[in-house]
Image: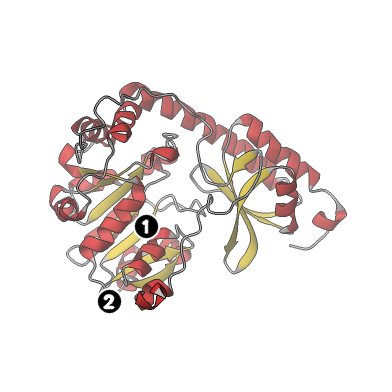
């Protein structure tokens, strides 16, 4: 059997379970933090017989303008996930080095580390929030990479740019602080991207999957100082960006589309505030985490409510958080989709679901 050829760390690996990995059926999909908006793009197939530019200049320059950085500080990747992989493959020695992360958080940090046989110093979101930068610099130990998802998925928690800056300064020449900003467009004033200008050990991960409504494109960016990105450019695949992907991405990060994206973000943030109000006033909900991002995470009084949602064709993301399995993350959809959530909440008024103690 070929399984006998597997390294021990791969044989023991627990794969990341994405929102789309479960074959569910439904009519309202609010489980993957996708945008409810879609847009048609112009695509040419006239030059598909040629290899693409590894780092398409027009996209790089447009995204550099958007992020207020220089083009040499931008690396285009296959989603932010490739940025995570590249950082580990480039800066961590298998079987020797480690990363630090703050759970609960995005699961691919752990999966990527386990895949490359990299140690994990697992700290908590509470420590990230409550400890000082000085204390955190000691808690991360010998970690080469310190992953901070900001805003955090799935809690929505946010830490200040000032705290990230101080942590990076304390870890200078010891570790790289990797700030995953997949959801930053929903609170753009909290971006750490400008820290790159003065901190060689700050890396920011971005994606077009969320606010830019291009989850199907699988396009992201790794932002860092030129010298920090140079080793990643040696490790990345020779042709990581398909021609068609580059064409669409260039259109997506144009000035006009950025204005459109920001308008959509404003609408989604307003709808999110309305959803939070509904959740907080529902007798079926015991706790609501009101952080940033295009989602809300909540704790149900009875997890049987999730099954009732599936029966209605309403698909949301169940979680086990803080040792309890009755948590649910709801992506912010359009007004019609969130009305389906409201109808589900209103249906959770039977004694079986509302009389239990939290």
Give the labeled residue for mark 2: 95
Q: Nearer the viewer, mark 2 or mark 1?
A: 2
Q: Is residue 127 shown left or right of residue 191?
A: right
Q: Is residue 354 shown left or right of residue 155?
A: right
Q: Is residue 264 shown left or right of residue 69?
A: right
Q: In terms of secondary structure, where does tag 1 sit?
A: strand
Compared with residue 228, is residue 251 higher up or lower down, i.e. above or below?
A: above
Where's residue 314, x and y in %?
68, 43
Please give the name of the residue rendered at 32% of the width and 52% of the height, measured from the top-left corner.
82
Where's residue 195, x and y in %?
24, 48
Please give the name of the residue rendered at 32% of the width and 56% of the height, measured from the top-left corner.
84
Q: Which mark is residue 136?
A: none
Mark 2 is surrounded, within 10 Å at the Cα level, by few (under 14), some (14 to 19) or many (20 or more) other residues, namely few
Q: Quadrant of residue 249?
A: top left
Total residue callouts: 2
- Quadrant where the C terminus lies? bottom right
Q: Specify which label sits upstream in the sequence, 2 or 1.
A: 2
Residue lying farthest front?
1
Give the labeled residue for mark 1: 148
Where's residue 222, x and y in %?
27, 47
Q: Can I make out residue 17 in this image? A: yes
Please give the name of the residue rendered at 70% of the width and 48% of the height, measured from the top-left corner.
310
């Amino acid at each position: 059997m070929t399984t006998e050829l597997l390294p021990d760390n791969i044989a023991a690996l627990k794969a990341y379970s994405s929102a789309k990995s479960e074959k569910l059926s439904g009519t309202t999909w609010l489980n993957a933090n996708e945008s409810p908006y879609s847009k048609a793009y112009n695509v040419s197939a006239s030059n598909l017989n040629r290899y693409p530019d590894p780092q398409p200049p027009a996209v790089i320059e447009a995204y550099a303008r958007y992020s207020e950085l220089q083009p040499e500080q931008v690396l285009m990747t296959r989603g932010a996930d490739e940025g995570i992989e590249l950082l580990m493959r480039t800066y961590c020695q298998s079987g020797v080095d480690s990363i630090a992360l703050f759970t609960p958080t995005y699961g691919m940090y752990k999966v990527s580390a386990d895949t490359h046989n990299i140690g994990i110093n697992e700290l908590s979101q509470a420590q990230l929030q409550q400890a000082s930068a000085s204390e955190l610099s000691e808690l991360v130990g010998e970690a080469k990479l310190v992953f901070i998802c900001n805003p955090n998925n799935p809690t929505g928690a946010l830490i200040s740019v000032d705290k990230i800056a101080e942590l990076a300064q304390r870890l200078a020449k010891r570790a790289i602080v990797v700030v995953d900003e997949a959801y930053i467009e929903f609170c753009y004033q909290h971006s750490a991207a400008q820290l790159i200008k003065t901190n060689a050990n700050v890396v920011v991960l971005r994606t077009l999957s969320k606010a830019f409504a291009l989850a199907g494109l699988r396009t992201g960016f790794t932002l860092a100082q030129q010298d920090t990105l140079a080793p990643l450019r040696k490790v990345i695949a020779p042709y990581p960006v398909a021609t068609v992907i580059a064409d669409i991405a260039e259109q997506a990060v144009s000035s006009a589309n950025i204005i459109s994206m920001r308008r959509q973000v404003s609408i989604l943030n307003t709808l999110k505030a309305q959803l939070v109000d509904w959740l907080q006033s529902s007798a079926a909900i015991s706790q609501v985490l009101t952080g940033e991002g295009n989602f809300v995470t909540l704790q149900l009084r009875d997890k049987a409510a999730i099954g009732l949602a599936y029966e209605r064709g309403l698909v949301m993301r169940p979680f086990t958080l803080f040792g309890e399995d009755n948590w649910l993350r709801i992506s912010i959809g359009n007004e019609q989709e969130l009305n389906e959530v409201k109808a589900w909440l209103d249906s959770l008024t039977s004694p079986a679901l509302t009389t239990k103690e939290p």
